[in-house]
Image (cartoon, rainbow, N blue to C red):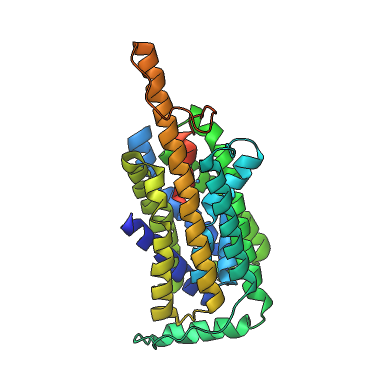
Amino acid sequence: MILVQLGLAGLNVLSKLTMASGMSPYVLITYRNLLGAVFLAPFAFFFERATMNQVFYFVGLKYSRPTVASALNNTLPAVTFALAAALKMEPVAALAGKAKVGGTALCVVGSMLMTFYRGPLVRTLASPIHWPYVQRTMAAEAAAHAGGHTAALGAALVIASNVAWAVWFIVQKKMSNSYASPYTTTVLMASMASVQCGAIAVAAEHRLSAWALGFDIRLIGSLYAGVVASGIVIAVMSWCIQVRGPVFVSMFSPMMLIIVAVVGWGILGEKIRVGSMIGAVFIVVGLYTVLWGKGRDIVATETAEDDEEKKIGGGEPSNGAVVDGSAVSRPCPAADSHEATGKP
């Protein structure tokens, strides 16, 4: 999972640099899904004979900073829980449910702080890395988006990306019950997404030069987003979920925030502000509060199932089969696994 977070951190930094060089986010999304589908297709074939969220995310990343985007990504479990609770798919009366509600509120507060409160700059050491190409590219990109509204727009689009992913998780919960083939569904999703995003990119970018790929950062960024982010990362996370479970995978999400902050400071020269730090703390605390509540749900569900098996076998039920006087329904493993993966 540490390698997974390194891969996702590289996606944030490298995609930001790729778009800063002039590549359209719509074109990058199209190449990402196309290359991801090509990379995963052999795995789907041998082992088993994942759009709108990506559009929001990459456009939001273009107008925001990698550290802010990484921090806001940690609101995804809370957003998913909020939508599921509104649809009465998650219990909120028990202690675990109240913890998830409180964690969601903390994530919302942190998101608002990162979006609307910048604060003074945090004094940090100068980066020892001096890459002239990156410095020129980021300086030109900063001059092109010098307006203060772009940061708020970027953060809002990243949050919209999380909402779109949360809706997809809920829909995926029903589909995975009858078709549990993660490699095949990911290839199908990436293939259809490449067509959809290609149509959007053609409408948004009329210049043929926007699609040009040379031996430069555009090619590297497209290959990385497709092969690593949409290919290797999804496969490794799926394996980790099967071995250790979704809650274990979710616990590593804040690690990407730290990695992106360090790499963004070292390579992109990104400045850290007080508002971003305070908001990130709220989001991380809220994330682990939601995960704690989810873990309690899983433990209570497993206890209830053990009691049911003992009753059928004539044994004695164990304590803790009932939480706050109400029966606990088993959450769908497929939905939890997708919730833990983040953005493929």
Q: In the picture, which quadrant includes the N terminus?
A: bottom left
- Foreground of the two, 304 or 158: 304
172 vs 315, left or right, is right
* Residue located 35% across and 85% down the image: 129
The answer to which image quadrant residue 93 occupies is: top right
Residue 149 appears in view: yes
Give coordinates of residue 339: x percent, y percent.
Answer: 49, 45
Question: Residue 303: x, y in percent?
Answer: 40, 29
Image coordinates of residue 123 in percent, x first then y, are 46, 86
Residue 73 in percent (x, y) is at: 52, 59
Q: Is residue 51 visible?
A: no
Q: Residue at x 45, y 63 (%)?
A: 222
In the image: residue 206, left or right of residue 137: right
* Up-down relation of residue 334 to residue 258 (above or below): above
224 is higher (above) or lower (below) than 247? below
Q: Nearer the viewer, residue 268 or 81?
A: 81
Q: For this rendering, which residue is in front, 146 or 113?
A: 113
The vertical placement of 127 against 189, above or below, is: below
